[in-house]
Image (cartoon, rainbow, N blue to C red):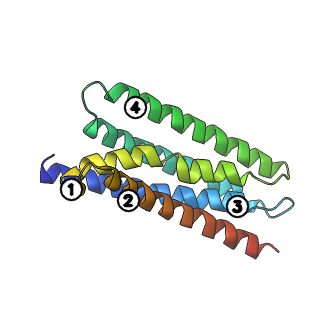
Amino acid sequence: MPLLATLALDLVFAFAGLCSVYIAFAWGELCGIRPGGDKSGLGGFAFVLLFALLRGVAVAIGLLCVARDGEAWWLLLAHLAIGVIAWRCFEREVRRVQAEHWPSLSVGLLVGVLLPLPAFTLVLVRTNERWLGDGVSAWSIVAGGLAGAHALCHLRQRRDMLRQRR
């Protein structure tokens, strides 16, 4: 991939990464709401859907740019399916909070941390394979860094929410 195209795609992906980190924070906040606690901030969660849409479009652009022969359609379909699953899980957990139940930490970690990893890792490694290489170590480092950043955002926000509402 030419240098200018790599830089442009990396910029698109930096934006997608910021959206994704925001979503991880939001999942941490949602998973930190105690039953019977203050739910006045639930209306602000509409922004999660906006940021998820922005992230989804940016990742779809990245997938289209790095797809190899015969990959584009199934990558986009898988990306769309994961997006729908994430959206439905988010709706379900918001309803659980509204019904005075604990939100599921495992669902929050799955959707806020793990589901974004495959597409993000694929696009970042393929975009930058000239510098990263295409070996197992490159994939592991990128996936581990992304997982760590998302998990840190999610878990710190959840911890802060639980600490505030004692």
Q: Name the residue rendered at 85%, 53% in the picture.
A: 100
Q: Residue 41 carries which label?
A: 3
Residue depth check, mark 1 versus mark 3: number of the one nearer the observer:
1
Location of residue 48 in the rendering, given as x and y in whole percent from the top left corner: 57, 52
> CB of mark 4 within 8 Å of CB of mark 1?
no
Q: Residue 7 carries which label?
A: 1
> CB of mark 2 within 8 Å of CB of mark 3?
no
Q: Name the residue rendered at 75%, 75% in the picture.
A: 164
Amino acid type, mark 1: Leu
Amino acid type, mark 3: Gly
Residue depth check, mark 2 versus mark 3: number of the one nearer the observer:
2
The local secondary structure at tag 1 comes to helix
Q: Is residue 108 left or right of residue 125?
A: right
Location of residue 7 in the rendering, given as x and y in whole percent from the top left corner: 21, 56
Location of residue 26 in the rendering, given as x and y in whole percent from the top left corner: 60, 58
- Of the two numbered discs 4 and 1 on the same chain, state the one appearing first in sequence: 1
Q: Distance between the residues labelled 1 and 3?
A: 37 Å
Of the pair 122 and 80, the residue shown nearer to us: 122
Q: Which mark is residue 76?
A: 4
Residue depth check, mark 4 versus mark 2: number of the one nearer the observer:
2
State whether residue 28 is above or below residue 54. Answer: below
Q: Mark 2 points at which residue?
A: 141
Task: Give the tally of numbered discs.
Answer: 4
- Of the two numbered discs 1 and 2 on the same chain, state the one appearing first in sequence: 1
Q: How far apart are marks 1 and 2 (CA)?
A: 20 Å
The local secondary structure at tag 4 comes to helix
Residue depth check, mark 3 versus mark 4: number of the one nearer the observer:
4
Q: Distance between the residues labelled 3 and 4?
A: 33 Å
Q: In which quarter of the image is residue 40?
A: bottom right
Amino acid type, mark 2: Ile
Q: Name the residue rendered at 29%, 24% in the picture.
A: 70
